[in-house]
Image (tube, helix red, strand yellow):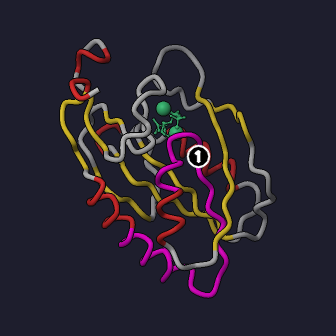
Amino acid sequence: MGTDLKKVLITKEEIDAKLAGLAEQIDAEYAGRELLLVGVLKGAVMVMADLARAVRTPATMDWMAVSSYGAGTQSSGVVRILKDLDTDIQDKHVLIVEDIIDSGLTLSWLLSNLGSRGPASLEVCTLLRKPDAAKVAIDVKWVGFDIPNEFVVGYGLDYAEKYRNLPFVGTLAPHVYGG
Ligand code: PRP
Ligand code: MN
Ligand code: MG
C-alpha cells in the first residue's frame, strides 16, 4: 500500500480544519433553518460523516447513488440513478455533499435533477475541486481545496474501489494505474 502512493496531498489534520471552517459558514447560512444533507455515494461518505458532525445546524441526511455511463472511462455526463433519495425534497433546504468535482458532469446533472424537485434552496459543498478538469461551469458555494489535475485517492476517493478508507488525500503512483 505504502508504495502505491506518490505523496500525501492533504493531511487528515488539514481536512479536519477545513471542514470546521466550512461548517461555520454553513451554520451561518442556514441559521434558523433545517438542513437536508444529500451525500453522493460512495465517494462522499467520509466528507458527509465529518461535515455532518461539524455543523451545529439541525440536519437530516439522505443519499443518492449515481453512475455515469457511455463509451470510455471518461464521465459522459449521462447519468443513471442507482439509488434515489428516500425523501421528498420539496421545500427543503438541500445541501449536496461531494468528495470531488472533476469534470463537473455528475454534479451538473444532479443539480438539474434535484433542482426540478422543488427544493426551497439547493447548494453544493465539495471537499475537492479540480479547476483544470472542468468541462462545465458549476456554481459551487463551498469548496474545501482546489487541487491540480492529478489522480487522487483516499478519504472516500477510490481507484477501482480501493483506497477509500485512507484517512488523508494522496496522489497515486503512476505504476498503479498503468501510467
Ligand atoms: C466520482 C466522485 C464524484 C464524481 C466527480 O464518483 O466521487 O462523484 O466522480 O466526477 P465528475 O465531476 O467528472 O463527474 P464516481 O462516479 O467515481 O463514483 P464513487 O463516488 O462511487 O467513487
Ligand atoms: Mn462520487
Ligand atoms: Mg469513484
70 versus 151 height, above or below: above
52 versus 175 height, above or below: below
Residue 100: image location, x then y, percent: 42, 45
35 versus 172 height, above or below: below
Identify which residue is drawn at 36% across, 47% down: 167
Identify which residue is drawn at 42% across, 38% down: 157
39 or 146, nearer to the observer: 39
Q: In which quarter of the image is the N terminus?
A: top left
Identify which residue is drawn at 73% across, 39% down: 83
Judged from this view, the residue extending furthest toward the bottom is 32
Location of mark 1 (residue): 40
Under mark 1, the amino acid is Val
Q: What stretch is highlighted in magenta?
A: 20-48
**SS label for mark 1:** strand
84 or 80, nearer to the observer: 84
Labels in figure, total: 1
Residue 41: image location, x then y, percent: 59, 42
Label 1 crowd (10 A; few <14 / some 14-19 / many >=20)? many
Residue 162: image location, x then y, percent: 43, 27
Would you say residue 8 sits in the magenta stretch?
A: no
Q: Quadrant of the C terminus?
A: top left
When asked about the image quadrant of residue 151, the answer is top left
Would you say residue 42 sits in the magenta stretch?
A: yes
Q: Is residue 59 left or right of residue 56?
A: right
Ligand 2 closer than 8 Å to the CB at disc 1?
Answer: yes
Residue 40: image location, x then y, percent: 58, 46
Identify which residue is drawn at 26% across, 59% down: 14
